[in-house]
Image (cartoon, grey):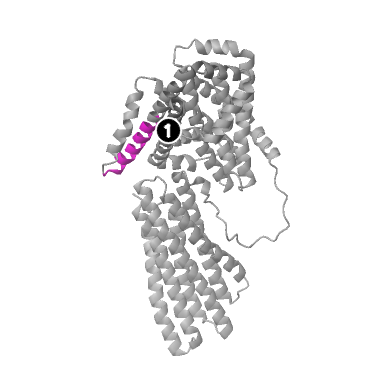
Amino acid sequence: MVVLKAILMLFAGLGTFMIGLDSMGKNLESFSGDRLRNLFTKISNKKVLGIATGCLTTILTQSSSATTVMVVGFVNTGLMSLIQATAIIMGANIGTTVTAYLIALQDLPVAGFFCALACVGVFMQMTKKSKIKNLGTIFSGIGLLFTGLYVMSSSMTSVLEINKEAITELILSLSKYKIVLILIGALLTMILQSSAGTTSILIGLCTSGAMPLEPALFVTLGMNIGTCITAIISSIGASTNAKRASMVHLLFNIIGTIIFGIILLIFGNKIMAIISGLNIIISMKIAIFHTIFNVTTTLLMFPLMKQLTQLASLIIPEPKAKAEAKPIVKIDEFKFVDNRLINTPAIAMIMLRKEITQMAIDAKTNLELAMNMLFEKNIDKKEEFVSREKHIDFLNKQLSKFLVKISNQQITYENEKEIAAYYHNISDIERIGDYAENIVEYTEELINANVDFSNECKKELLDMQNAVYNEMNVTISSFEKKSLEELSEVEAYEDLTDTFFNKLSENHIIRLNSGLCKAESASVFISLIGNLERIGDHTMNIFNSMKTYIK
């Protein structure tokens, strides 16, 4: 019963640690949301900047797997090249070593104070101030992390007290087979899907004296391979380049493991003598080795980044092209949004904004197409219009579901306001698409009735159309830039659209009474300018919604 209780407490401690790490990482990411967004929006072809981005992102999220999954998502949407992804992956491997130092703090006298942060964080969350509340969630995460480590350490000590010699002998027997130690590290990390979880167990064994330092280093090598499993799983069903990005991550760690494995086998005694001579706790020695591994591997692979991506491309070649007719518009696909990014709301919000911007561009493209068909009295491009309208309807439904998923994550109050505005934006854009669809129907009515508008009528209609186009162009640009600077310009175009609506209504009645326009076209014209006026209103709604979340 004592052994069973100790084992159960070990799992309880591991669970508490993982929950604390996850909570701390998510709330750090939420707390640093704008900084994280800025990091990824400034991604360029500068490899050093990419490494720094990967490193800082991993420190903020406390998970190299989360960073790599984000990278796979970016590559999948085509916003990041394979070379850029490789640089960020290298940086992520360096950033993940910070967690090992955090875990090593459990052996210091201050560990008890860190555990107490769980309670401090709870009290901080009782305040009404959002910043203090968010900081409190981070403190609670840190407290749970160290509480989990303490429970794990105590349970391991209890198990070892029962039969320490047998456990130590088993570990020493395994130590003869270095490849087995590497596989153990890889498999355990794959199961936990967290190198931090494996590190915590490893440090616990070493601190208790059950595992010597040398076999622990080989297990550490295996951990770096095992952590690749999350990215590999996330790349299933993704684009070829996204799969290559996860392969780059795997190749990077396998090559590094081989290099360091050989170094440890050849110079093991000398290396152990140097490490053993360091006057620091054993957990810190493991953390230092983990850092040396990732930094050195990055330095070695940095000049070979292009070759690494070529090797990944060789392993995962381009699929053979299928002889299929491509649709005019891809109806049931996102261009930017990717569910792989949902666990990192700050990044998911960037992609969501891009997708909504593209949705608005698609709605405007369909409006232009509808107006061109109207002026030309030709509906040859109706098939393209219908495909794009179906895509807008798809986005209306699926983006709303994506917004719900983000809302369920740990996000800031500012993000909540932004998400609330996005719900309305998506609806407004969908309505613009519907009005464009009405215009196509009006065109068909004119064609079937064999009537047309007068030249004067068309000229006025063209002026109103241009006012609406300008309002949409400025609004879409402002939405994309997240800027309110063009407010007066958008309001001017909206006022102009309303003025045209009133003026065109009056003028059309005059033309109708004088016989310049036929009665058959009257109802179509009034409905048409009414639709254009409503499009202007919905466009203004989109711009005004930004006032709720832009300071």
Task: From the top left corner, tell me how far across and down residue 481 is, in percent.
Answer: 44, 51
Residue 373: x %, y % from top left:
57, 73
The relative height of residue 320 versus residue 164 in the rendered view (above or below) is below
Q: Quadrant of residue 116?
A: top left
Nearer to me, 254 or 353: 254
Is residue 84 something one can see in this rendering? Answer: no
Q: Main secondary structure of the magenta part?
A: helix
- In the current view of this chain or complex, which residue is farthest to the front? 1
In the rendered view, tell whether residue 518 sits above or below residue 438: below
Say which quadrant the N terminus sits in.
top left
Tell me the kind of residue under disc 1: Ala
**Magenta highlight on residue 140:** yes
Q: Secondary structure at mark 1?
A: helix
In which quadrant of the rendered view does residue 86 lie? Answer: top right
When the figure is inspected, residue 313 is found, relative to residue 330, above or below; the finding is: above
Front residue of 237 and 462: 237
* Residue that badge 1 annotates: 12
Residue 84 picture location, percent across and down: 57, 38
Write the residue at 47% across / 12% down. 278
Query: How many neighbours does mark 1 have within 10 angstroms: few (below 14), some (14-19), or many (20 or more)?
Result: some
The image position of residue 2, as x and y in percent, is 43, 25
Q: Is 170 inside the magenta-drawn segment?
A: no
Q: Residue sitting at 48 percent across and 71 percent down?
A: 435
Query: What stretch of residues is rendered in magenta?
Result: 128-145
